[in-house]
Amino acid sequence: TAALSIKNLHKVYDNKFEALKGISLEVQPGDFYAVLGPNGAGKSTTIGIISSLVRKTSGHIKVFEHDIDKNFSAAKQELGIVPQEFNFSQFEKVRDIVLQQAGYYGLPRAKAAERADKYLKRLGLWDKRDTPARMLSGGMKRRLMIARALVHEPRILILDEPTAGVDIELRRSMWDFLKEINAQGTTIILTTHYLEEAESLCRNVAIIDRGEIVQNTSMRELLTRL
Ligand code: ADP
Ligand code: ADP
């Protein structure tokens, strides 16, 4: 079974604008997969639909064997999603934000604490655990989003433009962290508009433009064509 399978996905906004024109793709377990495309291509819309924040117009999505329409709660357990916008409460403390997410996924309290602490440490946020989120730098907020997405240890991590607006040094440390998580078995899918980011991280790539997949190939193959 594929980790993620998308078939003929359409999205029409406001009954008039067709943001996704029937995209299909498959991501295998363990892959590091890029959805690469310019602004407005439909990347965030696709992720929004997978995470059920955006309603699809038509199409089918499976996460491992779970159809997201029929078995959303099972699919949800497999997914960690890092949206582009910071969507945590700015007034909550860092550790509490991660703990809250763990509770949302049904982790018992002791397990939640253990996991929260593990990911706060791995992402360099341990010293900030009691700091309200609003006091964090942009890069720290980005890392908080990743810690929060990993707390239930999903088999698939999906990140929407994870390094947009992040400086080069932090970008490299985030890349190293993602490589590490992938090497430990997590399937990673990220959207990006930087070819360089896809090139340094990903094994396979779908290029999306104006709601359509225009290429779907291995990164190595893509680089020989450019
Ligand atoms: P990307 O993430 O690749 O930049 P998006 O998925 O955000 O692309 O957007 C795809 C297209 O859909 C764009 O033309 C965008 O303007 C449009 N769009 C996105 N969200 C909405 C919305 N809520 N209502 C109407 N149009 C939208
Ligand atoms: P800014 O947003 O101002 O760039 P950051 O919060 O991104 O600041 O980074 C603060 C410091 O934490 C930087 O020195 C950065 O290199 C370091 N850092 C970034 N990622 C990690 C990580 N995964 N683990 C440990 N330290 C990190």
Image (spheres, rainbow, N blue to C red):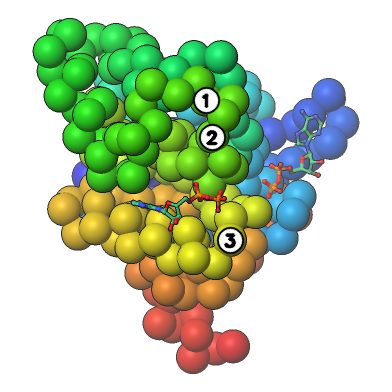
Q: Position of residue 185 (x, y in %)?
A: 18, 51
SS for tag 3? loop
- Asked if disc 2 and disc 1 are in contact, CB closer than 8 Å, the reply is yes
| On screen, residue 218 above or below 85 | below
- Asked if disc 2 and disc 3 are in contact, CB closer than 8 Å, the reply is no
Q: Is the distance from the Cβ of mark 1 to the nearest ligand 2 atom less than 8 Å?
A: no
Q: Which residue is mark 3?
A: 167
Q: Which residue is mark 2?
A: 136
Q: Earlier in the sequence, mark 1 or mark 3?
A: 1
**Callout 2, which amino acid?**
Leu
Regarding residue 3, the answer to whether it shows in the image is no
- The structure residue drawn at horizontal position 33% and vertical position 45%, both measured from the top left corner, is 124
Query: Mark on residue 37?
Result: none
Q: Which residue is mark 1?
A: 133
Q: Earlier in the sequence, mark 2 or mark 3?
A: 2
Mark 2 to mark 3 CA distance (whole Å): 15 Å
- Asked if disc 1 and disc 3 are in contact, CB closer than 8 Å, the reply is no
Q: Position of residue 165 (x, y in %)?
A: 65, 54
SS for tag 1? helix
Mark 1 to mark 3 CA distance (whole Å): 19 Å
Point out the image quarter for the N terminus. top left
- The structure residue drawn at horizontal position 25% and vertical position 39%, both measured from the top left corner, is 121
**Horizontal placement of 212 versus 196: left or right?**
right
